[in-house]
Image (cartoon, grey):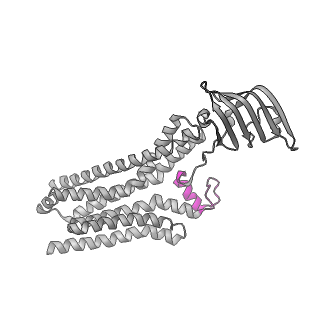
Amino acid sequence: MLKNKIYKYLTVEIFKNFITILLTFSAIAWTVRAVNFLDLMIEDGFSASIYFKYSLLNISSIITRFVPLSFLLSIIISIARFERQQELLILWTVGINKIKIANIFFLIGFFIALFQITLSLFLNPFTLNKSRALLRETETKQINSVLRSNDFSDTFKKVTFYIDKKNTNNELINIFIKDNNGSLNTLIGEINKSNDTTIFAERGVLYENKLILFNGTIQTLNIKNEIKNINFEKTELNTSNFSNRTIKDPKIQETSSIILFKCLKNKFSKKCSFKNDKKVIIENLSRRIGMPLYIPLISVLASFLLIYKKEKKYSLFSLSFAILILAEVLLKYTGFSLGAAISYYILPIIISIVFYVYLVKKIITEKMA
């Protein structure tokens, strides 16, 4: 009964440290990334609510990237604190077996690996795809924020704006609009025959999804390469036809794992946008499934802290950290061949077994000495 309480105490302390470190790293990284996402409002004209929703949907992917490092730091910090407070010495005194403690570390590492696989394989693609769909299904509302005085703006695809200045009433003065995409082809009948339109106006006002222009000229180039000019005193442009440059098609990290597996099985799958890039698919799946397999290996290496003296503990941390870096580097090579991918999956399992057997022998030898 007492031993079970001790094992539970050790497990809870490691998990507490793990969650604290993971959330700290993730909060810092998310804040930095959220600052980068400000371009969604400043450059692309999305609303603040869309910006916050998009940022929040990226949290799970940030958390996933810090799971291995957070686990390494948590288990090392926990062991160091247990040792500093003489808790480990008490455990050895009451007859707690070091192999059982090492098994607990390995079991914790195993569950954290499952946690990362769940995030990487299912949750992350879902939330990232939702964030991309959010941009794809949302119209750009704050066009006024992307139009700046004395500056060319190419936020919208094949549509260029130039505004001389804005007055105190937020009116746009001396407006130039160049459309090469046919976004303005509903303005008048003539423009329906052309995808090349240029508009000059003395002033304009943005109201809801409309740009109201006053005193200007519409210049069109028709299919016969004839230039036609139409003067107007007032006209309205429907800005909902404008499409910004934000990438709206799902990237590979935003694609469901099920779809990626189908891509490997059937490269002619209609749902697969990456069927011609098998290397990238394998690399991405290796990150989702293979990378977490290195976490139990870290737990085995950390278990050597139970038997080694202080001067060797820094070497163990350096070795564990180097393995995490090596795992990241090797990911880039998993897509080159099937053998490379299989090796990436098998390598941490084999090394874990070898180190675990060596650890058990060292503990038995220490006990017999």
For image coordinates 21% across by 66% down, the residue present is 310
Q: Is residue 60 magenta?
A: no
Left-right relation of 212 to 133: right
For image coordinates 26% across by 71% down, the residue present is 359
Q: Quadrant of residue 299?
A: bottom left
Name of the residue lying farthest toward the left? 93
Q: Is residue 257 magenta?
A: yes
Q: Is residue 230 visible?
A: yes
- Between residues 331 and 110, which one lies in front from this camera angle? 331
Residue 2 horizontal/vertical position (percent): 15, 54
Q: Quadrant of the C terminus?
A: bottom left
Residue 366 sits above or below residue 161 on the image: below
Left-right relation of 313 to 205: left
Left-right relation of 66 to 307: right
Q: Is residue 300 visible?
A: no
In the rendered picture of this protein, how many numbered marks are placed on residues?
A: 0
Residue 178 horizontal/vertical position (percent): 73, 40
Q: Quadrant of residue 83?
A: bottom left
Q: Magenta segment, which residues?
A: 253-277
For image coordinates 32% across by 49% down, the residue present is 19
Residue 288 sits above or below residue 33 on the image: below
Residue 77 horizontal/vertical position (percent): 26, 56
Residue 236 sits above or below residue 290 on the image: above
Residue 247 horizontal/vertical position (percent): 60, 47
